[in-house]
Amino acid sequence: KHERSMAKVCVVGAGASGLVMVKELLDGRHHPTCFEGSAEIGGVYAHTYDGMQMTTSSHMTAFSDFPPKCEPKIWSGQEYVEYLHSYVEEFDLMRHVRLQSKVLSIQRLERKTSDAPYWTVLVQTSEGQEVSHCFDHVVISTGTNNIPKRFRYEGQDTFEGVVMHSGDITNWSQFDHARTVCVGMGESGSDVALAVARRPGASVALSIRRSPGWIVPRYRGPLPADMMTNRLLWGLPRRLGGMLGTILARADASFSDPVIRKMGEMNLKIQTSDFGPFGTFGTKSTAGVEAMVRYGAAEKPDIACVGPGKHVTFTDGSTMEADYIVQSTGFQPCFRYLCNDLQKEGTIANDSLMDQVSEDVGNVRRGLYKHAIHPELGLRLMFQGFIRPGFGSLPPLVEMQARWYVAMLNGEASHRLPSSAEMRASIEADAAGEEFVFRKGPGVRVAAMVDHVVYFNDLASLTGCLPPFLRLLASDPSALWMVITGPHSGAQFRLRGPGAKPELARATILSYPSVFFPIRKLALISAGLWLGSSLLCLLLLPFPRSWFAGLRDDLQPMGFADSRAAYNRLARLRARWDTLAPVHHYHTTARPDKQPNLKPLAARNSASPAGQTEVTANQDN
């Protein structure tokens, strides 16, 4: 264990993911070195357009052991970078970060002994020198937002206007008195459309290629809207998502505010199967809606072709003249440094495994265990931050990834890293669940999409830091109340397990405002649905499992790994009793199509009607 805790680890990227990985590795007594290609930390947030606003609140975005000192608010991009600088200073991380150090290649070494370094990393310094470094492990923390995703239109060679990506914007004044087509109504697209529409003399068309996702405002009343991301609302069975979505959208569509009313009408049109907001990604900004309602931005479909001149034709046949086309079409990852083009002495020649890794990581849903680890390389190579939560904030998830990874390096995780075959089976089960939930909504096209609460608690279970619900019920009910009804932040996962800081975690959890005081409509709706489904689930226990197996699985709350595991243990005991009790003999033997499901819990995950991978925990409450 002492030898494992002294590993040399290369971390690529000094954004939020890389910084928290460095911090957790130091806490685990490892030796990290972080290489950042640019001249400052912060990742994409260090290079954003002027006036950029985050889509999640300060308290939901902050790391679990470094809570913000401000009241809950929506940070600007600059404020978040300042928070990261404070984080680096608090934990003395900068001495492990090398700025202006571009990673050129990552290659496996030919190892003659088991304790020899596994990787060689070629880095270009700020002076242009190329230096090789040897490491035991590599963590790629660059995430999915590396290269702007650009689209080329039919006839673009004849188009006399400017086609650009939102990442290219440096000065909003260029859109003054200009005709602009803003492509995309995700979060960046919405913000860009409103910023352009507000410019003097500007004319804007908002081209929505497919669907904007489930639109929510940044604020609901005095608080950021994501403060309602709690275990009641997001612990609802996913089958109730359609009902919840209809209730919320209709309530918003009858609102007096024209922006909220338009938002509700657009949400009613979103087709997300039976899962409502659970079956898609969230557009956590009403800026695009406001651009249409208050500034007259025209709603248009996808662009069919452009040119000649400044002519733009849309797929519905409508046309307009445009000086600018701004594509807010997202980003894509880049793994050039994993290729074998820069073969070095002592490395494995024609490394087919790394070629396969480069191919697999292109589809993180189907290629990586828990969206992070390749089955053939295990802990030697980790991909951190290659996820996109539908709702909720990314930084706490990448922090949990870091804690899980370090706990496995130290042998402290509650679950060992499975074998390669087991990881591949888990990948298929998780992918089937995610694709089932997101199969019909806009989220199906985002390979890195995860269900925030399910994924968060899944990793917490594997790490061994799920909140001790039963212990809190007996010893600290006020903290338990806030764990369930308060924001689903990373603080509640610091109550126990590797890296636990229970006193800080409790103080942070109790500092959150309650969603019930003052009483909020959304809180009451979610509480009623959650309690109703839980009660019905318990009422079904006395009946043979063969009668209501699908309904039971559909109604189990999400995000409570201990309670879900306990319920399934009771259900399995009941099913085994059914096979022995004469009174139920007819139901268990005469109807082979209704046999009790006696498979192990892990085997049932991939066949769950709700498509969700079960979260289990071997933890003592």
Image: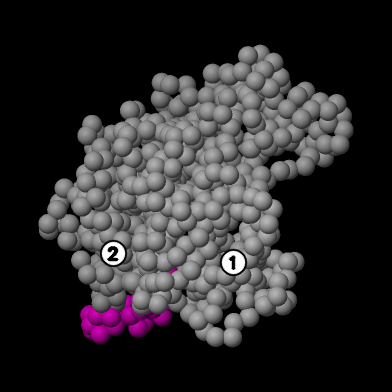
- Secondary structure at badge 1 equals strand
Q: How many discs appear? A: 2
Instruction: Tell me what residue is drawn at x 36 percent, y 76 percent.
Output: 2
Which residue does the image show at 54% across and 21% down from the upper left? 293
User: Which residue occupies the foreground of this view, 395 or 474?
Assistant: 395
Q: Is residue 587 magenta?
A: yes
Residue 165 is covered by the magenta coloring: no
Q: Which mark is residue 15?
A: none
Residue at screen point 75% across, 66% down: 341
> x, y (%) of residue 329?
64, 41
Determine the image quadrant of residue 560: bottom left
Q: For the N terminus, which image quadrant?
A: bottom left
Q: Nearer the viewer, residue 257 or 35?
A: 35
Residue 161 versus residue 601 in the image, above or below: above
Q: Secondary structure at mark 2?
A: loop
Give the residue type at disc 2.
Answer: Gly
Query: Bounds of the magenta span?
Result: 576-605
Disc 2 target residue = 497
Image quadrant assignment for residue 546: bottom left
Question: Which SS does the magenta portion mostly show?
Answer: helix
Residue appearing at x 43%, y 52% in the figure: 93
Q: Is residue 541 above or below residue 581?
A: above
Amino acid type of the residue tagged 1 in the rendering: His
Q: Which residue is mark 1?
A: 133
